[in-house]
Amino acid sequence: GNSVTQMEGPVTLSEEAFLTINCTYTATGYPSLFWYVQYPGEGLQLLLKATKADDKGSNKGFEATYRKETTSFHLEKGSVQVSDSAVYFCALSTGGGNKLTFGTGTQLKVEL
Amino acid sequence: EPEVTQTPSHQVTQMGQEVILRCVPISNHLYFYWYRQILGQKVEFLVSFYNNEISEKSEIFDDQFSVERPDGSNFTLKIRSTKLEDSAMYFCASSRDMFANTGELFFGEGSRLTVL
């Protein structure tokens, strides 16, 4: 079956620090990969996605590259801001179905 | 900006009681979903709903669970007889197109259910 493993949080960084949140997956077939973000008091929202190997998804300064050889989709940002404090969820979908398989979520806290 | 809204934000109930969680999806969306997250665990798919019927459901979604779109705007999740292990955050989501085409679901803030 499908599964997603994320690094455990919480992750606490100083503003302008480099961020990496690790995500690895197990999937049947060729998954599409996603990062969702949940800001305090809001619903989960799509941050970025990649649908095939070597694709790079990017949005709001965040990037993640679909690595088939290592079954990974790590989230990175070069310089985080306090406003990036949120919970980040890695997820996948396979087979053209309409459901997501999520990881546990990683809480990020950025301090001044 | 249109958003998915969920009520209540938090509900406490006694084991064995019926609970209804309500969601108002984005108005022009056609596909609706419920997910849940037990504290410290992964967000899990429960059910998807399209054209007034369930299109897919997980093993978790047993006979104790049901979904309904009673009036064209609300989308509800009912748990008939709650158990302690139903305590979780329940997320409603909607999408305009088949998820497979866009990969984007729009989620509500969640309803936290605590079963005592």
Image: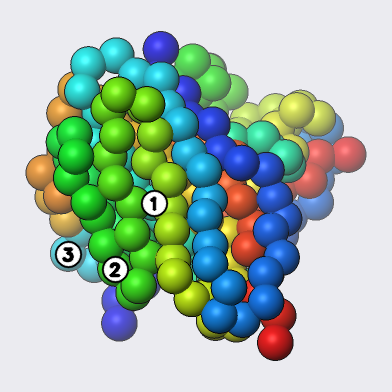
Residue in front for this viewpoint, B2 or A6: A6
Q: Which quarter of the picture shows residue B7?
A: bottom right
For the C terminus of chain A, the quadrant is bottom right
Q: Disc 1 on helix, strand or loop?
A: strand
Q: Spatial distance from mark 1 to mark 3, Cα to Cα? A: 24 Å
The residue at 53%/62% (across/down) is A19
Disc 1 crowd rating (10 Å Cα; few below 14, some 14-19, many 20+) is many
Q: Which kind of residue does numbered mark 1 sit on?
A: Trp
Amino acid under label 2? Asn
Quadrant of the drawing holding the N terminus of chain A: top left
Assess whether mark 3 and mark 1 are in contact (beta carbons under 8 angstroms): no
Residue underneath mark 3 = B28
Number of marks present in the image shown: 3
Q: Is residue B78 above or below residue A28?
A: below
Q: Earlier in the sequence, mark 2 or mark 1?
A: 1
User: With A25 as the anchor, is A60 left or right in this view?
Assistant: left
Q: Residue at x 38, y 41 (%)?
A: A73
Query: For mark 2, what is the residue?
Result: A59
Helix, strand or loop at label 3? It is: loop
Residue at position x 52%, y 55% in the image: A20
